[in-house]
Amino acid sequence: MFDLESRLLQQRESDLYRSRRIAESGSDVRMRIDGKDCLVFCSNDYLGLASHPDVKAAFISAANEHGVGSGAAHLVTGHHRAHHALEEELADFTGRERTLLFSTGYMANLAAVTALTDRHDEVFGDKLNHASLIDAARLSEARHIRYKHADDSALEQRLATSSAKDKLVITDGVFSMDGDIAPLPALSAACRRHNAWLMVDDAHGLGVLGRHGAGVLEHFAMHNNDAAVMVGTLGKAFGTFGAFVAGSESLIETLIQKARPYIYTTALPVAVAEATHASLKIIQTDSGRREHLHELIKYFCQGAAQLGLPLMPSATAIQPLLVGEAVRAVAMSENLLKQGILVSAIRPPTVPDGSSRLRITLTAAHTRKDVERLLTTLEVLV
């Protein structure tokens, strides 16, 4: 018999128990959580678009016209002209031949890896990849080979000893718990030398990095053939919901034919597609949001350095404050909440043992005064 109570007790005793907080207001930097007004520094709504009036208006208008559900999978009756138009717009934005919409970034990663590889192939993944990439490699049945975090030399060594005909390298663009950026030019060069494909999950770079917000590949001025597969999510900087895979015509057609998470899933609501169209337009025309965000990142990092706060090396909106033990990370998060500031404590197994942290995220909706308040409060706690 499954002794679930003992398992749960062990989670509690190890300070690894997870609890849900109840939000009583919409996604924003100021929210009411569990009955308490909070200044939020743990949202992935990097550009503050989830509550943008144009994005909300587009959603409401589409819901009024088309309803709130798509009714079926894309390959049945769920593929609306709004989905199709958004795919074309995202292809133009990312500079790819085509894109394909998915319900979540998790499903997009599962779809791409499992559709491209099988037990005869090898998948090479960064040791700090997101859980969805790790699970995708496992479900693919390909041999999963992990290399040292952000180490192109380690990847090169593993590729050099591979005898697999088809090899796929998978990596986060911006690592979600550390905030650092993968060395994509070096990884891509290693892939070219060993006839491997590179797949980049740009969940935390898209909309934020690059001159036009096209993500980590634009940040490095890389060409499309430098990374055959790109995955982007819409629930972070875009402020809506869902994800997409971008690549060649043949890649997208392969996913339509073979990707189970695409074939057997109900399509996104049309209202979400139309809201995303509105947010994409803002990303393309309002560079001020990105500029403000990057100014806040620099301001926070400078302030933290002056205070001697143990930030992990990151130049992105994800600014992890290394704490160490899970019990201390939880205590610090709770103490911040008592001061009206919400920051999540990140513990194993999400991060390695001994590296629990406060995962601080900055957004374009924050102000300098918000960041000053956070720094002042952290100075007392650390």
Image (tube, rainbow, N blue to C red):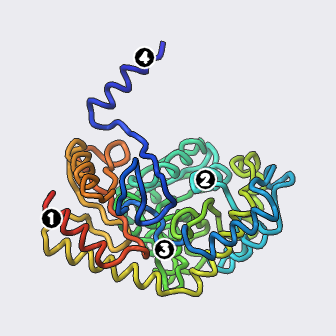
> What's the CA distance linking mark 4 and mark 2?
34 Å
Q: Is residue 299 left or right of residue 51?
A: left
Extreme residue in the right direction: 77
Residue found at x 40% / y 78%: 293
> What's the CA distance linking mark 3 and mark 2?
29 Å
Q: Which residue is mark 1?
A: 379
Of the two numbered discs 3 and 2 on the same chain, state the one appearing first in sequence: 3
Residue found at x 62% / y 61%: 243
Q: Which mark is residue 47?
A: 3
Q: Is residue 373 left or right of residue 121?
A: left
> What's the CA distance linking mark 1 and mark 3?
27 Å
- Residue 168: percent from left, percent from top: 56, 58
Residue type at mark 2?
Val
Label 1 environment density (alpha carbons within 10 Å; few <14, some 14–19, many ≥20): few
Mark 1 element type: helix
Q: Which mark is residue 3?
A: 4
Q: Is residue 44 left or right of residue 316?
A: right
Residue type at mark 3?
Leu
Extreme residue in the top direction: 1
Of the two numbered discs 1 and 3 on the same chain, state the one appearing first in sequence: 3
The reply to whether residue 189 is in sight is: no
In the foreground, 187 or 10? 10
CB of mark 3 within 8 Å of CB of mark 4? no
Mark 2 element type: helix
Q: Which residue is mark 2?
A: 113
